[in-house]
Image (cartoon, coloured by chain):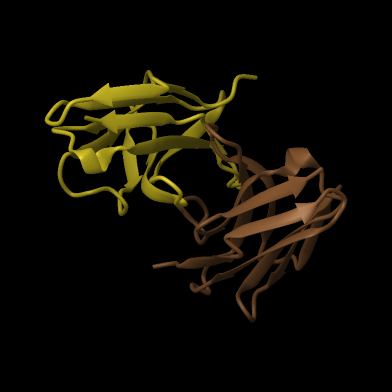
Amino acid sequence: NAGVMQNPRHLVRRRGQEARLRCSPMKGHSHVYWYRQLPEEGLKFMVYLQKENIIDESGMPKERFSAEFPKEGPSILRIQQVVRGDSAAYFCASSPADTSREQYFGPGTRLTVT
Amino acid sequence: GENVEQHPSTLSVQEGDSAVIKCTYSDSASNYFPWYKQELGKGPQLIIDIRSNVGEKKDQRIAVTLNKTAKHFSLHITETQPEDSAVYFCTAGGTSYGKLTFGQGTILTVHP
């Protein structure tokens, strides 16, 4: 049973470009979460999605950031017009549609903005 | 919103010793407390969790305790091994699903 998959693992973008991060949840999981980790810090919640719905985006910056989880395909975190402060590790987690609430994390995408 | 404080930030022990990491949370509505282990360059790995209707839970060398009145929870690792060396995060969740609030992390080093 494959775990949570994220790609790319490493992404380098120049200031002003767009970054697209992908997350495929574990088989049978319908809840997806995105977190951001700055160097030597804990993870900070960004957004929680179910298929075709954003449930909680309270941690998302108001501008330049968006997320989706379409009916088919992976969840996408999109960052437009990246700035150096966006450099971080972005982790996706998934959980099953039962009451266990256990979140399982992917290996992360390390974004570097030059 | 929820705030989770974690101590110590670094912990160094000899192989075979015990390690204890302590956390406090602020939101009395939080009722789910998972712990994660993160190795260098990898994603966090769920190692154990505890829910608010339980005061203690054990899984082999790992145990967690929860004091809801004081809003404290702790991770205990016994008979530590070098492969336990990693960053450990306590987290708190407050709804049926939804976000986890992470502590700042503890860098645990187990010396052979």
Q: Is residue A78 left or right of residue A32?
A: left
Is A53 in front, or is B52?
A: B52
Residue B99: x and y, percent?
Answer: 45, 52
Quadrant in which the N terminus of chain B is drawn: bottom left
Extreme residue toward the bottom, this view: B69
Task: Out of B13 and B78, give the one closest to the viewer.
Answer: B13
Q: Which chain is yellow?
A: A
x and y, in percent, of residue A39 in the image: 41, 45
Rendered location of residue A97, percent (x, y): 54, 38
Q: Say how many tags the image has.
A: 0
A104 is higher (above) or lower (below) than B73: above
The residue drawn where x is 32% and y is 23% is: A11
Residue in view at x 40 percent, y 49 percent: A45
> Which quarter of the figure has residue B11?
bottom right
Seen at 49% across and 37% down, the residue is: A93
Colour chain B is painted in: brown
Q: Is residue B70 above or below residue B14?
A: below
In-front residue for pair B31/B91: B91
Residue A77 in view: no
Would residue B69 be visible to someone looking at this image? yes
Provide residue B95's location: percent of width, then percent of height: 50, 58
Please state which of residues B14 and B92 is positioned toward the viewer in this rendering: B14
Q: Is residue B69 left or right of residue B56?
A: left
Q: Quadrant of the C terminus of chain B?
A: top right
Q: Residue at x 77, y 40 (%)?
A: B82
